[in-house]
Image (cartoon, rainbow, N blue to C red):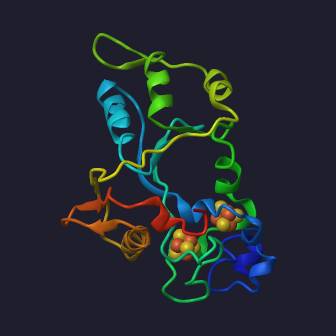
Amino acid sequence: MTDVAKGNISDKGVISKNWEDSPCSLCKASWCCTHLPLLNMKVINRQDWIKIMSLADYNHVLWGLKDDGTWTLYLHRPCTNLKPGGQGCKLHGKAEQPWICKRFSPHRCWYQRAFPQSASLLMIQWDSLRLSWLEDRITFSKEGQLEDVPSWKEMMNSWKGKKILLNHKQNGPDLLLPIGPQKTERDRDIINYKLCFPGVAIHTENNFIINGDYRLSEFYPWQI
Ligand code: SF4
Ligand code: SF4
């Protein structure tokens, strides 16, 4: 059995056959190629929560709260390798395509299940407005430890079917985030994958910079 048949390697990658046969050809939004995961964290105390709130203010970012309690900050900009029209990878079938993209299987695609609804059993998306709502409902102990949060059902029902509103401020501030591990080939591959997204660059040895001053029309010319 091939790796593709086992679902170990994406048929978007180097060993795929026809694009038309891939589930990706039916995925108009290309969620995986338009949402770059920047940071994962959990909220244990008030400091964590302040970080969540402050990072939501940057341009083109959203938080996803996953069903295991992990918060992931996503940059919502289309990868520079996405073909015009927003479907298909220019590096498809080429050695330069990031390994992480090659190995991702679209046959049980988590993005396809988690992203179309902005609030689902798998993930709830958060913009600044939603976070303000949540801030009124979470509690911390006197020592600053997280005490109580609304149930998943309450959060989901509050936002199900509603769109999130991302920031598109003129001259938005740049965002600095840690690069993360840089030891193995896989680490370097993930760094290169992140650099495929517009406005993402290496700032210092340990930090990425995400340029806040990009206009959405430059990313989605086919949608404007
Ligand atoms: S991997 Fe999933 S989200 Fe990405 S294009 Fe394919 S079906 Fe869509
Ligand atoms: S390189 Fe970019 S467009 Fe290609 S599969 Fe990866 S994220 Fe998508």
User: Where, quadrant-wise, is the N terminus in this rendering?
Assistant: bottom right
- Reply above or below: 4 against 120: below
Q: Position of residue 215 (x, y in %)?
A: 41, 60
Nearest the viewer among 123 and 170 is 170
Residue extending farthest to the left is: 204
Q: Residue at x 32, y 30 (%)?
A: 50
Nearest the viewer among 79 and 94 is 79
Nearest the viewer among 211 and 138 is 211
Quadrant for ligand 2 reads bottom right
Residue extending farthest to the bottom is: 94
- Reply above or below: 224 against 188: above
User: Where, quadrant-wise, is the C terminus in this rendering?
Assistant: bottom right
Q: Residue at x 34, y 51 (%)?
A: 170
- Total tally of numbered discs in the picture: 0
Q: Position of residue 59 (x, y in %)?
A: 39, 49
Q: Is residue 182 left or right of residue 3?
A: left
Residue extending farthest to the right is: 21
Q: Residue at x 51, y 29 (%)?
A: 130
- Reply above or below: 132 against 184: above
Q: Is residue 15 left or right of residue 178?
A: right
Residue extending farthest to the top is: 142
Tell me if I can see residue 23 in this picture. yes
Q: Position of residue 141 (x, y in %)?
A: 35, 12
Q: Residue at x 70, y 35 (%)?
A: 161
Q: Position of residue 75 (x, y in %)?
A: 45, 55
Tell me if I can see residue 105 in this picture. no
Q: Is residue 80 left or right of residue 200?
A: right
Rendered image quadrant of residue 54: top left
